[in-house]
Amino acid sequence: MLLLQTLRGAPNQSVLESSGPLADRVESLWWFAFATASIVYLATMGGLWWAAARARRRERQGEELPPDGERRMTRGVTIAVSATVVILLVFLITDLTVGRTLDPVPRKHPITVELTGKQWWWDVQYADTSAQGRVQTANEIHIPVGQPVLFLLNASDVIHSMWVPNLAGKKDLIPGYTQSMWFQADTAGDYRAQCAEFCGLQHAKMALHVIAEPQAKYEKWIDEQRKPAHTPTDSVADRGREVFLTGQCAMCHSITGTSAASHNGPDLTHLASRRTIAAGTLPNTRGALAGWIVDPQQVKPGTHMPPNQLAPQDLDALLTYLQSLK
Ligand code: HEC
Ligand SMILES: [Cu+2]
């Protein structure tokens, strides 16, 4: 039981806590492999124990190997090798079969998300037939429960890999080549995804949160995301906006409705609506935000955001502004 608990890991990032039709199939495959491997392990250990005990008994009684002993041993080894080959073949076939059933995208998939892997964060864009309907965000995806969602995967620097264990298998994000995958969540939850292909220094700190919620809640979220950024109403936040637009920040970040339109870093239009910052590395609190802005290299050494020396009042105003971007 303890072993299983350990294998299961965190409930929101676990193959053994499947929450959708694709992950169900992957989980069944996992249990099948686990059960088979357990039986093989027990049989091997039992056989070894039995052989050792018998050899010891023979030795004690000064018995010789029977005349057909050599032949019987060869037969035993042949049976064991054949069983291994058959088991591996069964694994191969079930694996390929499950893999094939995961691929075909359902004809009706109301939502398409364009996901781009970057060192070391995720650019998220919701496709739409109109430019106004498109949404750009980062490191957090919202999806409605019970609906298939299509993902178009790409990368802008090196190969990354998308893996939400509770919802689907892995798929690589390859620079310059668009791949697709899809999944569906059957229960609401905050599922943690992790880049699953080593992509450099901060690979471990490249998480993505997939938040599955009821349709109405999802629609409310996407409508909010479509709006341009909230314009400051108080003087401190307004000062913060000045700091953002006149400083370095605007050279790398975009905030819709302002002059900041660079996409070197994550879109910050609705930063305050996100649960975490820096690809799931820190909670989205004022303190964490301050620490990140002043010295991102301390949090994620090597990350492509430089440290910022800001006067205390400027930093304070900037934080107030960023926290108003709901
Ligand atoms: C040279 C480009 C660059 C500059 C200049 C820059 N950033 Fe960043 N910023 C990035 C990159 C790249 C990331 C993603 C880093 C990561 O997660 O590894 C990032 C991440 C962030 C995040 C976290 C966003 C999220 O949702 O995870 C915030 C907030 C942020 N920057 C604010 C600022 C502010 C405020 C300034 C100005 C004081 C600034 N940045 C200046 C490139 C830059
Ligand atoms: Cu990675």
Image: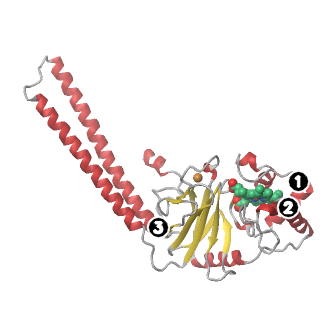
Find numbered disc 1 in the image and state the secondary structure of the residue it sits on.
loop
Q: On the rendered image, what quadrant is the C terminus found in?
A: bottom right
Question: On the image, which quarter does residue 72 sit in?
Answer: top left
Q: Is mark 2 within 8 Å of ligand 1?
A: yes
Rendering coords of residue 271 (x, y %): 74, 65
Between 118 and 270, the one lying in front of the other is 118
* Residue 84 in sight: yes
Residue kind at label 2, given as amino acid type: Leu
Residue for badge 1:
310
Tag 3 near tag 1, CB within 8 Å: no
Question: On the image, which quarter does residue 195 sit in?
Answer: bottom right
- Residue 13 appears left or right of 68: right
Residue for badge 3:
20
Rendering coords of residue 142 (x, y %): 61, 70
Rendering coords of residue 310 (x, y %): 88, 53
Residue for badge 2:
318
Residue at 35% across, 58% down: 95
Tell which circle, 3 or 2, labels the residue nearer the N-terminal end. Answer: 3
Tag 1 near tag 2, CB within 8 Å: yes
Residue at 14% across, 18% down: 61
Residue at 82% across, 72% down: 258
Does residue 72 sit above or below 300 in this rendering?
above
Residue kind at label 1, given as amino acid type: Leu
Question: Can you tell which of label 1 and label 2 is closer to the viewer?
Answer: 1
Residue at 45% across, 79% down: 107
